[in-house]
Image: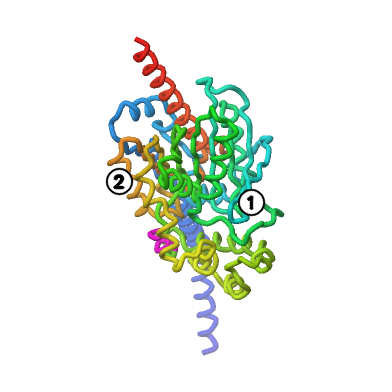
Amino acid sequence: MVLHFPTMTILEASELHTYGPDLPAVFDGVKLAAVAAILYVIVRCLNLKSPTTPPQIVYQDTPLSRYVLKSCPTLTREYIPPLLWGKSGHLQTALYGKMGRVNTPTPCGVRKFIPMPDGATATFDLFEPGKSHSTEDDITMVICPGIGNHSGQNYIRTFVDYSQRNGYRCAVLNHLGALPNVELTSPRMFTYGCTWEFGAMVGYIRRSFPQTQLVVVGFSLGGNIVCKFLGENRSNQDGVLCCISICQGYSALRAQETFLQWDQCRRLYNFVLADKMKKLILAHRKSFLSMASSRIDAADLNRLLTATSLMQIDDTIMRKFHSHSSLREYYEKESCVHYIHKVHVPLLLINSMDDPLVHHSLLAVPHTLAEKLPNVVFALTQHGGHMGFFEGAVLFPEPLSWMDKVIVEYSDSICHWRKHSCSSRTSSTST
């Protein structure tokens, strides 16, 4: 027994001596597998294998659409986002939400105040063009920003500066209740589809600049508002050259179901947007509670504190601004899907396939419109996220986005088409 233990000790030492050198190789293999797994996740999450392609364009073959597509090289050529992160819709969306744009300019404008019939005060910022438009005509872009946004947003400032440099006057609506440190003068804020403030801004521009022609631009929620505004009344389209809508969802009733899904982290985005809306509403708590005509009481604001989705906020607060009896009624009446087919001016609808906020099922609306209506062009990019559309080489994006360039190019093409058409009609009449 005494002799046996040393023998076993020698054997164990021998075994350690035999297999010990292989252990580092095993650990190296584990490390290599972990690195490979991480790289695989990065490639999948960043969508690095996805090819860059030109946007999918849906349109009817008309002289106008052929002219537009020929005149807009940015719209028809390959859209190339930054290589390392630009193919991820989540990163495009997050960077847009966090920084808006890079090297953001600060255009100089004048703030205008318009008293509304119900006591509210609409505000917008007016920016004069930096030079004459290439058609030599007076053209004003009337712009409606995204949810809770105003003229101070980086993406708006960048777009306005670029439009000014291309000869456009710009009027940017500040959503009611969105400006910091500006009190409400009536107990209501902007809603998903209320067109009153946008209509007041357009009316002001028409009165102040009788010779101007209008280009209507809407971003995200603003896209819903401008399309609904134009479709509500044929007279709203008077003097309008064209309309461009970027990254809207078209139908809030259909969208609400997708916003509760975890697919593409949509439920998380819903929570983040809801938190933003809660802060905006609560910033005006004193106004809602102090005005006799308010439909919002302390109990509503207390329920708002526990809301975790936009739908809960819309049901508790937003629908009550216009006395909608239910959430369904609010979404039905404030969505542009019931009005957009009545828009007869040239209409460009832009969405992205990897937009984490707009479910792909909602894109059937613009696709069908473009197939049926000769004035509609629908452009669907493979990448771009929600309102991102950054361009760049490998890592750093360019100051101007693909979206900025496309809007101005499309507007220019419509302006020149209309100018040429008017000149042709004048010539034929004189002869």
Name the amino acid type tagged 2: Thr
Name the amino acid type tagged 1: Thr
Which residue is depicted at the point 62% across and 43% down?
124
Question: Mark 1: which secondary structure?
Answer: strand
Query: Which circle marks residue 368 in the picture?
Result: 2
Task: Looking at this view, name the residue that lies furthest to the front.
Answer: 117
Magenta residues, as a range? 253-259
From the top left corner, tell me how far across and down residue 210 is, in percent.
55, 30
User: Is residue 256 rendered magenta in the image?
Assistant: yes
User: Which quarter of the rendered picture does the C terminus lie within?
Assistant: top left
Which residue is depicted at the point 40% across and 45% down?
231
Q: CA distance from mark 1 to mark 2?
A: 38 Å
Comparing marks 1 and 2, which lies closer to the viewer?
1
Residue hosting label 1: 121
Task: Looking at this view, name the residue that lies furthest to the top.
Answer: 431
Question: Mark 2: which secondary structure?
Answer: helix
The quadrant in which residue 184 appears is bottom right
**In the shown orientation, is residue 354 left or right of residue 147?**
left
